[in-house]
């Protein structure tokens, strides 16, 4: 437990975020799944140690777009696990988090619509469609 502060601002965080960004966007579903597990553990740990909101918000641009896209990934394990993670981590605050992170989310989705991997392109198109359908629905 004395090492948890390293997740807030230390070298562990500086190493972990690029690893998660790469893993959550990897072409191999096994790598995406492993990164999804690590991602959930990290977010859950940060919530359990009651990390300041500003600290969590610093992670949004890097991780939220990838977390959202993986809810549409073809591999069922990744897709289901990503849905469960979202509901577990953000049971009431999902829409405001997406609204707050909309710029990075849209940029990531557009980038992934042009990915080499057809599975990633398909997931990105479905994610864009979800945004188009749900935008403004919480008003």
Image (cartoon, rainbow, N blue to C red):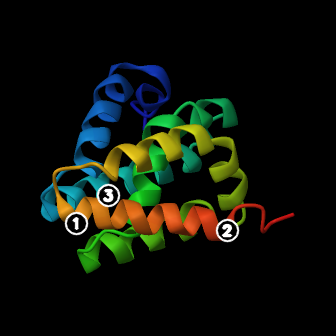
Q: Nearer the viewer, mark 3 or mark 2?
A: 2
Q: Where is residue 103 shown, x and y percent of the image?
A: 58, 38
**Above-or-below relation of 57 to 102:** above
Where residue 52 sits, quadrant-wise, is: top right
Q: Where is residue 86 shown, x and y percent of the image?
A: 52, 64
The numbered mark, 1 or 2, whose residue comes first in the sequence reads 1
Q: Mark 1 Cα within 10 Å, few/some/many (few <14, many 20+)?
A: some
For the N terminus, which image quadrant? top left
Disc number placed over residue 35 in the picture, else none: none
Q: Mark 3 Cα within 10 Å, few/some/many (few <14, many 20+)?
A: many
The image shows a total of numbered marks equal to 3
Q: Which residue is under mark 2? A: 134
The numbered mark, 1 or 3, whose residue comes first in the sequence reads 3
For the C terminus, which image quadrant? bottom right
Along the viewing direction, whichever of 65 and 50 lies nearer the viewer:
65
Disc number placed over residue 36 in the picture, else none: 3
Q: Where is residue 42 shown, x and y percent of the image?
A: 41, 47
Along the viewing direction, whichever of 55 and 58 lies nearer the viewer:
58
- Residue shown at 46% from the left, 72% from the top: 83
Where residue 37 sits, quadrant-wise, is: bottom left
- Residue shown at 65% from the left, 60% from the top: 94
Along the viewing direction, whichever of 12 and 123 lies nearer the viewer:
123
The extreme right residue here reads: 139
The numbered mark, 3 or 2, whose residue comes first in the sequence reads 3
Q: Where is residue 115 shown, x and y percent of the image?
A: 24, 49
């Amino acid at each position: 437990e004395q090492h948890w502060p390293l997740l807030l601002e230390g070298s562990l965080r500086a190493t972990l975020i690029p690893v998660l960004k790469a893993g959550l966007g990897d072409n191999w579903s096994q790598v995406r799944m492993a990164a999804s597990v690590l991602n959930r553990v990290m977010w859950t740990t940060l919530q359990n140690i009651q990390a300041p909101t500003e600290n969590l918000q610093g992670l949004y641009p890097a991780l939220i777009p990838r977390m959202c896209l993986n809810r549409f990934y073809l591999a069922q394990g990744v897709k289901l696990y990503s849905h469960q993670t979202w509901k577990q981590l953000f049971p009431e605050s999902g829409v405001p988090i997406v609204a707050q992170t909309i710029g990075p989310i849209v940029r990531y989705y557009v980038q992934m619509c042009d990915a080499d991997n057809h599975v990633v392109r398909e997931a990105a198109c479905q994610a864009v469609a979800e945004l188009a359908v749900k935008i403004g629905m919480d008003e």
